[in-house]
Image (tube, coloured by chain):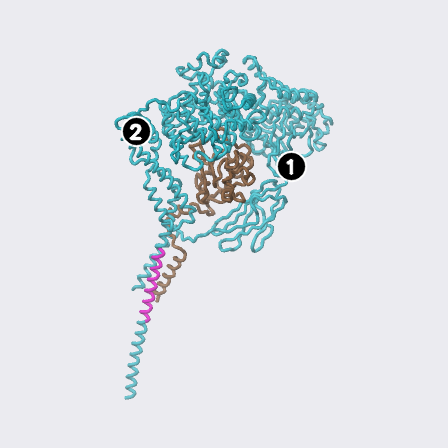
Chain colours: A brown, B cyan
Amino acid sequence: MKKDILAVFGIVLILAVLINGTHVQSVDEYYLTHIDDITPESKTVTLSIRCDTILRNYDDLDPALRSEEFVPKDGVIMPPTEYVLRDGDTVFDILERAVRHGRIQMEFQGAEENPFGSVYIQGINYLYEFSCGPLSGWMYRVDGEFPSRGCSRFELCDGQNIEWVYTCDLGQDVGAEWIKESGGQGK
Amino acid sequence: MNIKKTAVYILSLFLVFSLLLPHAVVTASASGPTLTTTLKDGAVVKNDRLTFDVCARNQAGQKIASAVTHNGERIAPVWEDSDKTSYTLILTKEGENTVVVSASSDGGRKKQLTYHITYIPTEKGQPIGSAVISVEVFTLGCGYLTEPELFPIRAGETAAETLVRLLHENGFVCYYGGAVEDGFYLAYIADGTASEKTYNGYKKSGTAEDPKRLGLTPSIPDYLHKNLFSSMDFYDPGDYEKNWEGHLGEFVISSGSGWMYCVNNTFPNVGFSDVYLSDGDVVRVQFTLGYGADIGGISALGGQIPGVENQPETGYYQTANKDELTLVIANARASGLLAFENVRRAYSDALSVAARLDAPQSAADGAASALKSALANPVAETEKPAETEKSAETEKPAETGKPTETGKPDETEIHAGTDTDAPTDTAGESGTPADIVETDAPPKSPPPLLSIAQGIIDWKKADVGSPKKGDLLCDAFLELAGTTAGDWYPIGLSRIGASDNFDGYLAVLRDKVEERYGQPGRLSAAKATEWHRIILSVLAAGGDPTHFGTDENGQPINLIADGTYDRGKTTPLGRQGINGWIWGLIALDGKRYEIPNGAYYTREDIIFEILSKQLSDGGWALSGKVSDPDLTAMAVQALAPYYESGEQEGISEKTEAEVCHAVDKALLCLSSMQLPTGDYASWGTQNVESTDQVIIALCCLGIDPQSDARFIKNGNTLLDGVLRYRQPDGGFAHSYDHDPNNPASVPGESNSMAGEQTLLAMAALIRQQNGDPTLYDFRSEEGGDDHPVVFSDEDRRAVDDLPSPLSTEQYVTVTALLDKLLQSEEFARKEEYLQKLTEAKARISEIQAEVDALNEEIREKLYPFESISLRDKKTVDAIISRYDALGAYDRTKISHWDDVIKAKTQIDTLQRAIIIGVVLAATAAAASVFLIISIRKKRRRHADEMEELAARFADEDEEEDTDGKE
């Protein structure tokens, strides 16, 4: 009789395990597959991608890009989204992770290919520099400020808020006063 | 027996699980809370109250707590019901407000939404013009602390905020009471280096950019001293140095001291934080020693402050309205004309009148109008010898922002350090414009141009890891062919006549151009300057830009057509701005290429576009109304072939006249922008590249930059200006200031872009001295030179030494060798080498294609991670086996490989989960079957026993019965 109860208990246990799922992983595997999971302990940053300024300068936009596919109605290509911050992550790392996971097109010039020694973001969602007038292109803000460093040279801290914004006026329309494409880049 | 076994099995499994469980996870997917609100991102609201609802639920659909911050401050809910929470925003900040709504549940999963709400009527922070602002310490005899400047003001910003910004930009900080938005009281202006968080209980304003010291040595004017001596409770002229050094404000020197301000010559009765400035206002922030009686501001203080009542109601003396004077001084500083002798003199007079507290109105007005008329007619310093000018300069205090110490000791050092055996013949050749320099015998002679250029080349060689005797255009450098970082050095090298690996460069560049022509947008969808730069570098390296490789249809690539006169067929030449027109014309005139009939643009079209973008002050800029020296110089370079040339066909006389007029104006503009140190500032940063471009522009026009009086300031030539940036390593620094626009440059450290542009400027000067065609005039260069190409032993060895298997690492080597071999003369084993190299090239292209395809596959198939399932197993396994097939170098070109590993691990876990599930299910089923069987067996046994028992009893009964019967 006792043995029967034990057997029933065993079966119930197995069924319970089955219902709960059977993901069995080693510690390393667990950390690898959950590296980007947000937990209360994880350091995170927020990233958004917007192109509102184009909506106000639609006439300057390359006609081939005049579609909601490229310029969403609300100007939001990606709403603020939280990402886990890994050690040493730069603004570029987070952007690349975001566009990969969000399956958003992005093209950049590597740090060695331009005279500024930092990755230069040429286009996001098919919107490129000069797609909307001669003073247009991508810029980024961290916590509301436009940093004076290239995006692959800006290391992030916990809780920072990154906004990639498209400017149609060398940054003036997004609140940056001093930004310019420095003499050499356009030559 | 069986039951026992099963139980043991289950128990052991359970044990195994309990060991695993603490580390491993039995997860059910959780998507975290859902969060919605009635706020709209980007909304523009005109009411200062905005109420909205937040609806936050956990996965189970229950309402959970939410948190809302408004501009970073937590706000409390107004009411809550079972379904949502309502909040009211009180919009006090005009302009953009940030509202962050967040909620967390289900094990700490957090959702966060950020909204940007714009509050009008007054959009705060928008530039709304500029005010003239000065900070004056005339009462201490110290002139201006910050000279009058046209300072940008922003909507919704209080005058206190504006002032703090101004102080910070000028290198100072302040200590204040209250807040910049409300109740601001300016207690002290202090050294930018001041580190105290508070000073006498007043808060520090933040940090100054480029901190400066006040550097005051008070020397109170006599006429003021008398008044203070007789009327102040406390007055000690030496008090600042004794007790306050570095902090100037209330109670310093006298009991009636402190900062006061007037707006449009009125001292307001309200605080700085209650004033919002408008475009054109004149704000004079002044230090008083006598409750304002010394600066015409006694009335502002009313009677509240003890000690004021002792002061004369009309002040110590009459003070003039200096608003006009202040404005003109600001204009003079902004004009860039201070280098002109008459302007400088009038400016200096104006400063001394402004600084006189008791100056009569007529003196103020007179100084203002004198300066105004000087600004309208700037006269360059003329025949004055440099010597006298220098001494005149030293008498005056340095009036322009920067001390003029320059790099003179450095210069001598460099000069002394230059190796004397460097070729110097170019400088002394007779009949060249350099003669003028010689006869003038300038006090300091610059190092020979060629040795400057050689210094840059040597520095760059070290930078790319090439030996001093080797080529700059080595394999590492050639990787950059076709990029902004890689194409200017070859131009500079070629134009100073240096020999280098131009053939290798051309081979790699051609290959890259062919590859890029296969992509949409070809070299660039928007930037025509990609073509222009490459055209110039092809010309410099001895190639033909009208036949540069073949496109995917086998047609020769004509960079000139596609990049200049026919560019408009796909994208306007000026899509990227004025740069596109300017460089298009320079490229087109590299060999004065003829434009065929039916082309999209004519030369006049392009010239017209450039001319039409000239600003009223004579220059050009990327945007705005203020001329930029770089773009102005580049526009002049483009227009130079049409300036008084008479050689151009297809250009109307009218156009040529317009070009002449435009260039003349541009030269004046450039002259006026030149700084006393000989160099230029662009976008606020004094730098070498702007100066380089001006040198090139003048050389293109045939003007000798070394002797033209318009471009010698204070005895400093453009070359002097350039040499300020020369570094001991031979390279050039971009600037000595931190430049936010050029993040790769470190102040005072050699920089690649500074080096390449200076190399071009040196090339321009050297070519001018030698009487060679100008920098971008390649007409005399032989296209496709006929010198015999020999595939040397070294080259053959390089082919023999190619590793096996090959990788993309050998791309540059193989491309350059193959190109050379194709052009080389016949030799015995040419066919063999040709086959080997062609195969190698094809193999490398294959590998490159595989690397690209694999990168694409990863990007396309493995995201987002949450969607990875067992169905992707095949894809992931295929990716991994393709990766394993690559060589070690090529594997480094696969980006985000860790994501593939992550996906693989995830799939393995899923697979394992299924196996474990099946095994467990089978175990459970088996155990159940055993259990059932054993229970049945037991039952049957039980039943049998019962039957037996019953039978036995029945037998007994029967016996009894029979007994009974018997």
- Is residue B823 visible in the rendered structure shown here? yes
Point out residue B89 in the picture as x, y percentages from the top left corner: 60, 46
- Position of B850 with respect to A72 (left or right) is left
Q: Chain of mark 2?
A: B
Q: Which disc, if any, is residue B183?
A: 1
Callout 2, which amino acid? Ala
Of labels 1 and 2, the one closer to you: 2
The stretch of residues the image draws in magenta is B916-939
- Position of B91 with respect to B712 (left or right) is right
Most foreground residue, B114 or B215: B114
- Position of B955 with respect to A139 (left or right) is left
Callout 1 secondary element: loop
- Looking at this rendering, what residue extends furthest in the top direction? B439
- Position of B445 with respect to B840 (left or right) is right
Point out residue B767 in the picture as x, y percentages from the top left corner: 44, 18
Residue linked to disc 2: B798
- Looking at this rendering, what residue extends furthest in the left direction? B828
Quarter of the image that includes the C terminus of chain B: bottom left
Among the 4 quarters of the image, the one containing residue B177: top right
